[in-house]
């Protein structure tokens, strides 16, 4: 039970707050006739069933590495199953796009959630004439407060997230049941034919409406992405509760709309019409629920970027830890402020939640489609034809919703693409830049290095103690090591070549010696899962290594090409990996190598 309540607070905030705005924005496009209302509700119910239950709860959550899920996990499962560089490159690009779209989604989620909740204040007596500017200002202040507290850590208050969301879902379900009694005919929405009939009858307008209907499933991807935090079982059990509450509430909103076709802010008007004295408590609850949903998304962004850093597709941004007890409580300042600035900009740019809905959905459906393609491919290669066929059908539904969102591009949807392009450009620039840099580096082969080292070790005076030299691959010795040892004559009694490599699976840390390279020189490797937060110093102590100095290479990049100039700037501004692994600053010695690109 405890796991289910935790899942309600951590996983279901985004999808749980979608009833605030989904039906409202749908019926800005459509006339609230009985057929339209029942048809839209039918599509909402079956969208939740297919795209959340079937795609994520059943199929995706069946694919994991040691209980961890997400786009990177799908990439790591799929990559070893395919052969050929082109296919591997295609999978890698798919994963990059998926990660970038998730970050783009992470900007719009807090903006639309908080804005839509604060807009409910206009129904409070005396606040009817509150201006749109005031609503945006209050929303911005809430967003600023939320992002400012990230550096302090949220573990002290996170225990309350689950119970608050539990109250939220119970409130949604209770509201829905009350209005169902007024219009029991709304139950016809369970018949999928009503949704199909709606699409056939409305033609192009019905197809466009799919772009707003998909908002009911935003946050569905969190079931899979957050599964490593809680495990699949509590998330699956919690989804049953969430699905029931959402369906009851949407049916209740539909019933209310049948009786009050002029309603403009359906959920809040339902509450006000039901019992005005509970309206303000409900409004406060909705604001808190949207803040919790936003918090879950922010924490998710930190995890995604941290994973991207550990598998070396993003530069090593500075990572802070907000909890002494739990190293997994991470905080990345650059990501936090990027998200805040983007959220504020989006709130000011769009001003109202229904206008912001025009930008929302593109990134979500893009992520869902990529997940569907990768799942279908995995099941096909694993020779599971039933799962492969089911994944293919779900992917077709994803693509239908994605195509319906294309009309949003000129109406503000381009902002979600622009935001997603920022991390995507950085990933491409950094990965390609690292490849280009590696090719330009002057390496000495292992066979050539060992005789030179043996001669230098035998004839040169040695410094007492142990020195660590950071190296990626012992078969190729970087010039900073040869420069340090042979040009500067810095040779210690004990020299350890240290490799730190990320593993394809999310968890596990191992440190081990490789075979000795020569007398006076050893090789040690640390391997870690991409979800792990490591302190290299602790692992080295456990292995009995107590170094006096840590040497590592720094590149002074000179470039004429604008691409390489930007890459050089990123390398200059970003912390080095040596800082990322938390080596003692007093022992560090960076050796600069000039590289022309």
Image: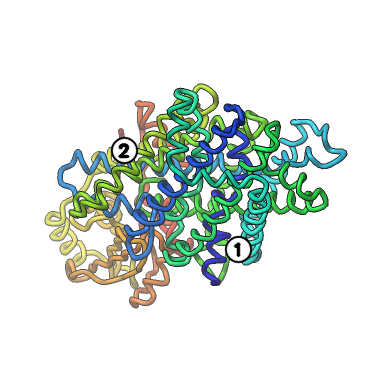
Q: Is residue 327 left or right of residue 32?
A: left
Residue ID at (29%, 43%): 392
Q: Earlier in the sequence, mark 1 or mark 2?
A: 1
Q: Is residue 35 left or right of residue 498?
A: right
From this viewpoint, is residue 592 visible? no
Q: Between marks 1 and 2, how big is the CA–CA gap?
A: 42 Å
Q: Residue furthest front?
A: 185
Between 540 and 90, the residue placed more toward the observer is 90
Residue ID at (43%, 42%): 192
* Residue 73 in the image, given as x and y percentages of width and height: 34, 54
Residue ID at (64%, 45%): 183
Give the residue at mark 1: 162
Residue ID at (57%, 47%): 336
Q: Residue furthest right?
A: 126
Between 554 and 192, the residue placed more toward the observer is 192
Q: Is residue 8 left or right of residue 424?
A: right
Kindly indicate the quadrant of the structure image that contains residue 567. top left
Does residue 333 lie above or below 566 as drawn? below
From this viewpoint, is residue 248 visible? yes
- Crowding at dot 1, Cα within 10 Å, few <14 / some 14-19 / many 20+, comes out as many
- Crowding at dot 2, Cα within 10 Å, few <14 / some 14-19 / many 20+, comes out as some
Rendered-image quadrant of the C terminus:
top left
Is the C-beta separation of discs 1 and 2 under 8 Å?
A: no
* Residue 292 in the image, given as x and y percentages of width and height: 62, 54
Query: Considering the numbered disc 1 on the image, is that residue within a helix, a strand or a loop?
Result: helix
Between 148 and 348, the residue placed more toward the observer is 348
* Residue 91 in the image, given as x and y percentages of width and height: 27, 43
Say which of marks 1 and 2 sits in front. 1
Kindly indicate the quadrant of the structure image that contains residue 170. bottom right
Give the residue at mark 2: 432
Kindly indicate the quadrant of the structure image that contains residue 505. bottom left
Q: In this figure, which colouring scheme has been used for the structure? A: rainbow
């Amino acid at each position: 039970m405890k796991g289910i309540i935790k899942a309600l607070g951590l996983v279901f905030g985004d999808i749980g707050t979608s009833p605030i705005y989904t039906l409202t924005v749908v019926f800005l496009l459509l006339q609230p006739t009985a057929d339209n209302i029942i048809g839209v509700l039918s599509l909402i119910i079956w969208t939740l069933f297919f795209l959340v239950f079937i795609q994520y709860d059943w199929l995706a959550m069946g694919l994991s590495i040691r209980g961890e899920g997400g786009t990177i996990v799908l990439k790591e499962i799929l990559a070893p199953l395919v052969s050929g560089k082109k296919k591997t490159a295609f999978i890698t690009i798919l994963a990059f796009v998926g990660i970038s779209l998730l970050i783009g989604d992470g900007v719009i989620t807090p903006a639309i959630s908080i804005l839509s909740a604060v807009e409910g204040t206009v129904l409070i007596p005396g606040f009817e004439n509150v201006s749109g500017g005031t609503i945006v200002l209050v929303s911005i202040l809430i967003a600023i407060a939320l992002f400012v507290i990230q550096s302090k850590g949220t573990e002290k208050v996170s225990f309350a997230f689950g119970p608050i969301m539990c109250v939220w879902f119970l409130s949604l379900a209770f509201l829905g049941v009350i209005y169902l009694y007024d219009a029991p005919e709304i139950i016809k929405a369970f018949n999928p034919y009503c949704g199909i009939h709606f699409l056939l009858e409305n033609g192009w307008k019905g197809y466009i409406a799919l772009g707003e209907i998909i908002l009911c499933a935003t946050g569905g991807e969190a079931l899979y992405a957050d599964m490593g935090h809680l495990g699949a079982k509590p998330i699956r059990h919690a989804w049953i509760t969430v699905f029931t509450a959402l369906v009851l509430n949407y049916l209740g909103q539909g019933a209310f709309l049948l009786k009050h076709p002029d309603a403009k802010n359906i959920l809040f008007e339902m509450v006000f019409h039901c019992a005005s004295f509970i309206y303000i408590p409900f409004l406060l609850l909705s604001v808190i629920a949207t803040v919790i949903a936003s918090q879950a998304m922010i924490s998710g962004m930190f995890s995604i970027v941290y994973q991207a850093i550990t598998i070396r597709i993003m530069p090593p941004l500075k990572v802070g830890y907000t909890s002494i007890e739990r190293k997994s409580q991470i905080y990345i300042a650059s990501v936090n402020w990027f998200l805040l600035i983007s959220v504020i900009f989006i709130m000011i740019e769009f001003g109202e939640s229904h206008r912001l809905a025009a930008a929302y959905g593109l990134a979500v459906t893009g992520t869902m489609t990529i997940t569907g393609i990768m799942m279908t491919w995995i099941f096909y290669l694993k020779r599971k034809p039933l799962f492969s066929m089911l994944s293919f059908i779900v992917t077709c539904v994803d693509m239908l919703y994605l195509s319906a969102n294309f009309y949003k591009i000129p109406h503000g949807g381009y902002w979600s693409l622009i935001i997603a392009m920022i991390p995507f450009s950085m990933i491409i620039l950094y990965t390609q830049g690292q490849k280009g840099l590696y090719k330009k580096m002057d390496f000495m082969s292992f066979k050539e290095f060992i005789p030179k080292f043996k001669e230098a070790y035998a004839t040169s005076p040695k410094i007492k103690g142990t020195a660590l030299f950071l190296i990626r691959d012992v078969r190729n010795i970087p010039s900073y090591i040869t420069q340090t040892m042979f040009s500067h004559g810095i040779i210690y009694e004990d020299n350890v070549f240290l490799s730190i490599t990320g593993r394809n699976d999310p968890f596990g840390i191992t440190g081990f010696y490789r075979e000795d390279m020569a007398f006076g020189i050893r090789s040690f490797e640390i391997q870690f899962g991409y979800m792990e937060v490591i302190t290299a110093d602790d692992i080295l102590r456990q292995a009995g290594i107590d170094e006096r100095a840590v040497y590592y290479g720094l590149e002074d990049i000179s470039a004429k090409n604008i691409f390489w100039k930007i890459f050089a700037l990123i390398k200059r501004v970003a912390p080095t990996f040596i800082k990322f692994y938390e080596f003692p600053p007093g022992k560090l010695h960076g050796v600069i190598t000039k590289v022309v690109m």
